[in-house]
Image (cartoon, rainbow, N blue to C red):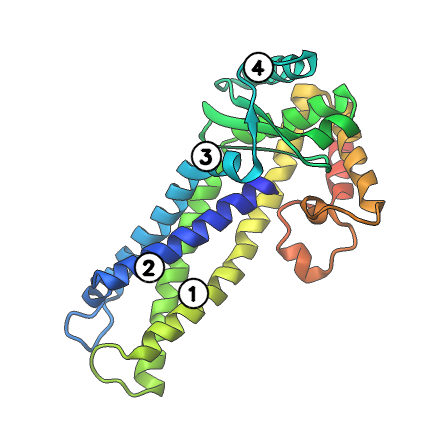
Amino acid sequence: MLRIFLFLGTNIAIIALLSVTFSLLGFQGLLAENGVDLDLTALMIYAGVIGFSGAFISLFLSKFMAKRSMGVHVIEQPADTTQRWLVDTVRRQAEMAGIGMPEVGLFNSQSPNAFATGWNRNNALVAVSTGLLSHMNKNEVEAVLAHEVSHVANGDMVTMTLIQGVVNTFVVFLSRVIGHVVDRVVFKVERGHGPAFWIVSIIAEIILGFLAMMLVMWFSRYREFRADEGGAKLAGRANMIAALAKLKSFQGTPDMPDEMAAFAINAGKIQKLFSSHPPLEKRIENLRAG
């Protein structure tokens, strides 16, 4: 969940910055050369440049942003036997998965958590929380690490970037079309664009971006099942099921940390649409079904 929201947050910020910058530089004026019609071809190119730029810049910054925002300590020289075991385990799993050795890191958090990020399969980061190490045994931690290594091996961050780029493109494109129509039909602006175009475009971009996030989250939930299967192959199906069951046991605690919110079984229908992870019981059932 952490890597998803770090990626999406960075993506949204970059999209907003690029949109404002392009507007100030006058690029949007090229979308209607005659001052009346909206050039849909030019608009699609414009939207694609902004959309994919936001997604790929987010991807390239993902590891740096994760380290800074989560306070990840990268293990360069293991300080104790636990850190040595973490590095050796990730190295062994990376070799089995056929990827380059990821950086291995720790971050302080009471809740059991882990994430993997990075712009390609051979330049990734796998990080675990201190809470994960204190609440799980070695077999369960190994399964969690295998799950994250599988995300890297499956190229999930790159695939998500491509999907996010397409989604961004259509959000920018449709928001400008909506702004143009409102400007012409409702406010009767005949040439150029009035204030309504900019205001409506921004509002539409926010609303469409919010709705488009459901598609990205659906993809994320689908990839979790694949990462579970990959984790089962690398660390053993029984260990993967045990790790998920241990996470599920934390759902009953009265003060469930925010990081665990995506695992909530009693989430409402709307919340489920925006959850980056499927319910844990479904993931366990999927693994048991083989």
Q: Quadrant of the N terminus?
A: top right
Which callout, 3 or 1, points to the residue nearer the camera? 3
Q: Is residue 86 above or below residue 198?
A: above
Say whether residue 101 is left or right of residue 28.
Answer: right
**Residue 180 x/y as whole percent:** 32, 75
Q: Is residue 62 above or below residue 30?
A: above
Dot 4 or dot 2: first in sequence order is: 2
Does the image show residue 268? yes
User: Residues at badges 1 and 4 in contact (C-beta under 8 Å)?
Assistant: no
The residues bearing labels 4 and 2 have C-alpha atoms spaced at a distance of 41 Å
The residue lying toward the viewer, choosing from 87 and 153, is 87
Q: Which residue is mark 4?
A: 91
Q: Which residue is mark 1?
A: 205
The residues bearing labels 3 and 4 have C-alpha atoms spaced at a distance of 21 Å
Dot 2 or dot 3: first in sequence order is: 2
User: Residues at badges 3 and 4 in contact (C-beta under 8 Å)?
Assistant: no
Which callout, 1 or 2, points to the residue nearer the camera? 2
Q: Residue at x 70, y 60 (%)?
A: 269
The amino acid marked with disc number 3 is Phe
The residues bearing labels 1 and 4 have C-alpha atoms spaced at a distance of 43 Å
Q: What is the quadrant of residue 290 in the picture?
A: top right
User: Residues at badges 1 and 2 in contact (C-beta under 8 Å)?
Assistant: yes
- Tag 4, which secondary structure? helix
Q: Which residue is mark 2?
A: 19
The amino acid marked with disc number 2 is Ser
Q: Which residue is mark 3?
A: 64
Say whether residue 96 is left or right of residue 263.
Answer: left
Q: What is the quadrant of residue 133 in the picture?
A: top right
